[in-house]
Image (spheres, coloured by chain):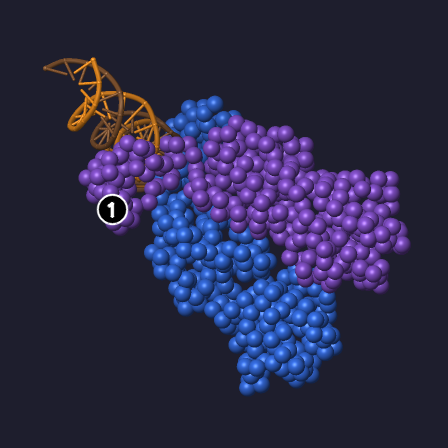
Chain colours: A blue, B purple, C orange, D brown
DNA sequence: AAAACTTCTGTGAACGTGCACAGTATGGCT
DNA sequence: AGCCATACTGTGCACGTTCACAGAAGTTTT
C-alpha cells in the first residue's frame, strides 16, 4: 500500500512525469486533453506531492517558522498570540505554506532555532515579542526573510514589522483622562526593553509633559501580578492619584485588585485605563476602558510583509496601524 | 555559498559519507579517531542535515501536526491551548520533532488537513477539542498515529488520550456546595457534544441525583457571552437559586456579570463555582472558586502517548488525571 | 516549399540522504 | 598457520521530485 508517486499518476494518465509535474506547478504548456486525463488520474490514485522530494530539488521547504521569544512561563499570558497564530495559519495555508512553532526562551532553545533556520528548514521567519539585543537576531541575519509582529527595538530598519501605533494609543488615553478633568494621572508601563513599553510611555509624556514626573510612573512586566505590585507602589508614593493609565489590560486587572484592596473606588476615586482591548478587559469589574489595537489587521499586515519577501520582494516598508479608544466603566 | 552537505563533511574529515551518516544516526560502529575528525569537520563547516533528503529515504518527516478543530473565532478563547502548545513544542523538540499547526474549522480546512496527513507529511497527529463525529476522524484512520488532548467522544477506544477527571471535578464542586448548605444548586454546562460538557454534568448529577432537575440546568458553549445568557435564563426559570456550578471559568465570568446585573451578591446570595482554574478565575470579582485541572500534566501525558506511538508502540492506554478544588471568594 | 515560431511532450540528471552489502583490518582461538 | 569473530569503512542504489533540454507536431511567415 505504498503512496502513489508522480510516476503512478503519469502512467495512469498515459503521459510522462514531466507533463504531470508541469500541471502541478502551473506551467502554461499542457494540453487540455492531458490536463483532464491527469486530473482524473490524480483523484483516482489519491496522489499528493511528496514535499520532501520537492524541497530537495527546489531548495524550498514550504514552511514558515514562528519564533516566540518570551520566557516559557509567560508565553501566551498575553492573549494577542492567538490572533496572530490564527491569521498566520490561515494566510500561510492559502500560499501552501505550513506554520511551524518554535520557542526561544532559553539558550538551548535559541540554538535550536538558529540551527533550524540556518539549516534551511524554513522559507521565512515570523518573530514575536523579540526583546532588544536578542542574540538570535544576529544569527538570523543571513537566513531566509524574517519579519516581526511588533517592532524589534534597534532593528527597526532591518526587520520589517507591522504594529499598532502605541504612542498614539497612549496619547488617546491620556488625553481622555485630561478631558475628564483628572489632575494626578499616573502610569504603569511595560518593560522598557519592549516597543510597547517605550512607546506607550512616550505617548503618555507627549500629553502630560513635565507633569509626568517619575513619582507618577511605575514599571511592570506585562503580568497581572506586576500590575498589582506597581499599583500598590504608586499608591504608597502618591496617595492622591485620581487616574492611572496601565500599559496592558492584564496589568490593569492587577491594578484594579490593588485599588480595591486599598479601598479606592473605580472610577469614582481613580479612573483606570488599560491597553489592548483583550478579553480580560471584559471580565474585570468594572469592565476596562482601554485602547483597542487592530490585532487582526496587524497580524494580516505582518504576514503580508513576510509573504511578499518570500515571493522575492527586495524590501518592504513597516506598517503602523491606528488605535482606538474604547470607553467602558473603569474611566 | 552553498550549504555544506554530508559529502563536504566526509571530505573534510577524511572519511566516507557512510561513516558520517553512521555517526549522525548513532550507529555504534565508528572509531574514536573518525568520531573526533567528523565532529570537528561538522563544526568547522557548520553542517546541518538536510531533513528533506533524509525524509525522502526514511519515510519520516520529523514533524507532528497539531489539529485544532474549533471554529475559528472561538479558537484560543479557552486559555488551555497555550499550555499544550508550550509543552508540545518542548517535548517534541527533545525528540527532534517540530510542531506544525493546522486548523480544521471549516470544510476547506479539514480537507487540507486530510491531504497533509494522508500525504505523509507528519509522523503524528495531535488532536485538540475535536467534536463528536468530526468527519476528520474517519479520514485519519489509516494515517500516522494520532492522540487527543481530552477524549474524543465515540472514539475513546481508538484514539488514545489524556484528560482530567472531569466527572470527579464536577463531583468535588457539587459536594462542596452541598457541604456549604446550599439547597438550590444549578449548573451551566458546556456543549453536550464535548467530553467536558457531558462528564461535568454527569458528576453534577452523580451528587445531586433527582434534585438535579432540568429547570436547574442550562447549556452554554464555553464562551463568556453564553455563560451570561445561561445565567440570566436560570434566574428567570428558578429565582431562588443559591449556588451555580459553571462548567468553565470563562462562562463563570459571564455568569457573574449576569448575577451582578440581577442584583445578586456573590457568594452571599449565590455561590459560584467555575472549572479550569484558568487566569480568568483571578481577574473576576470576586475571584472564582474553581476546579483545577492539571493542565501541564495532561499535556505531558498526551505527548508521551504520542511519542510512544511514534516510536512504534502498538497500543497505549488513556490517562485520566485527578482534579483539585481551589477555594477562593466566589463560594 | 522552406523556414521559423508556437505549443506541447518525453528524458536524463541532479538534489542529499540512509541503508544494505561487500570489503578490510585486527586480534584471539584452535 | 589457519580460521573466525569483531570492529570498522567505503560504495552503489533508491527515495520522488523539478528543471533544462531536445525534439515532435502543428501553424504561421517568408
Above or below residue B233? Residue A194 is below
Whole-percent x, y for residue B234 in the image:
84, 51
Which is more toward the observer, B303 or B190?
A: B303
Above or below residue A83? Residue B10 is above
Whole-percent x, y for residue A289 in the image:
68, 70
- Dividing the picture into quadrants, the one containing residue A293 is bottom right
In the image, taking residue B227 as reference, residue A272 lies left or right, namely left
In the image, taking residue B89 as reference, residue B14 lies left or right, namely left
Which is more toward the observer, C28 or B132?
A: C28
Q: Residue at image x 38%, y 28%?
A: A16
- Disc 1 crowd, CA 10 A, few/some/many (<14, 14-19, 20+): some
Q: Secondary structure at mark 1?
A: helix
Q: Which residue is mark 1?
A: B40
- Does the image show residue A33? no
Q: Residue at image x 87%, y 46%?
A: B215
Whole-percent x, y for residue B178 in the image:
82, 49
- Does the image show residue A238? yes
Protein chain holding label 1:
B
Which is more toward the observer, B144 or C15?
A: B144
Whole-percent x, y for residue B260 in the image:
80, 62
Amino acid at each position: 500500500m505504498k503512496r502513489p508517486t508522480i510516476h503512478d499518476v503519469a502512467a495512469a494518465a498515459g503521459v510522462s512525469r514531466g507533463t504531470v509535474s508541469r500541471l502541478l506547478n502551473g506551467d502554461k504548456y499542457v494540453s487540455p486533453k492531458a490536463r483532464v486525463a491527469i486530473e482524473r488520474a490524480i483523484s483516482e490514485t489519491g496522489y499528493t506531492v511528496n514535499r520532501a522530494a520537492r524541497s530537495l530539488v527546489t531548495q524550498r521547504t514550504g514552511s514558515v517558522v514562528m519564533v516566540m521569544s518570551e520566557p516559557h512561563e509567560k508565553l501566551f499570558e498575553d492573549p494577542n498570540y492567538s490572533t496572530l497564530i490564527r491569521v498566520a495559519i490561515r494566510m500561510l495555508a492559502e500560499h501552501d505554506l505550513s506554520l511551524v512553532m518554535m520557542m526561544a526562551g532559553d539558550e538551548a532553545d535559541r540554538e535550536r532555532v538558529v540551527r533550524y533556520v540556518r539549516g534551511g528548514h524554513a522559507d521565512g521567519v515570523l518573530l514575536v515579542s523579540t526583546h532588544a539585543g536578542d542574540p538570535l537576531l544576529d544569527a538570523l541575519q543571513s537566513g531566509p526573510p524574517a519579519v516581526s509582529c511588533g517592532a524589534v527595538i534597534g532593528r527597526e530598519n532591518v526587520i520589517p514589522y507591522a504594529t499598532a501605533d502605541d504612542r498614539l494609543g497612549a496619547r488617546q488615553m491620556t488625553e481622555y483622562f485630561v478631558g475628564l478633568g483628572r489632575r494626578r494621572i499616573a502610569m504603569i508601563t511595560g518593560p522598557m526593553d519592549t516597543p510597547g513599553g517605550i512607546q506607550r510611555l512616550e505617548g503618555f509624556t507627549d500629553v502630560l509633559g513635565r507633569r509626568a514626573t517619575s513619582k507618577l510612573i511605575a514599571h511592570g512586566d506585562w503580568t497581572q501580578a506586576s500590575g498589582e505590585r506597581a499599583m500598590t507602589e504608586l499608591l504608597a508614593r502618591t496617595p492622591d492619584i485620581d487616574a492611572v493609565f496601565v500599559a496592558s489590560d492584564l496589568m490593569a486587572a492587577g491594578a484594579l485588585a490593588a485599588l480595591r484592596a486599598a479601598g479606592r473606588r473605580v472610577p469614582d476615586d481613580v479612573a483606570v485605563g488599560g491597553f489592548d482591548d483583550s478579553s480580560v478587559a471584559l471580565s474585570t469589574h468594572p469592565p476596562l476602558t482601554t485602547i483597542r489595537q487592530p490585532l487582526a489587521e496587524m497580524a494580516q499586515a505582518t504576514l503580508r510583509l513576510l509573504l511578499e519577501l518570500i515571493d522575492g520582494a527586495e524590501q518592504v516598508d513597516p506598517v503602523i496601524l491606528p488605535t482606538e479608544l474604547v470607553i467602558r466603566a473603569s474611566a
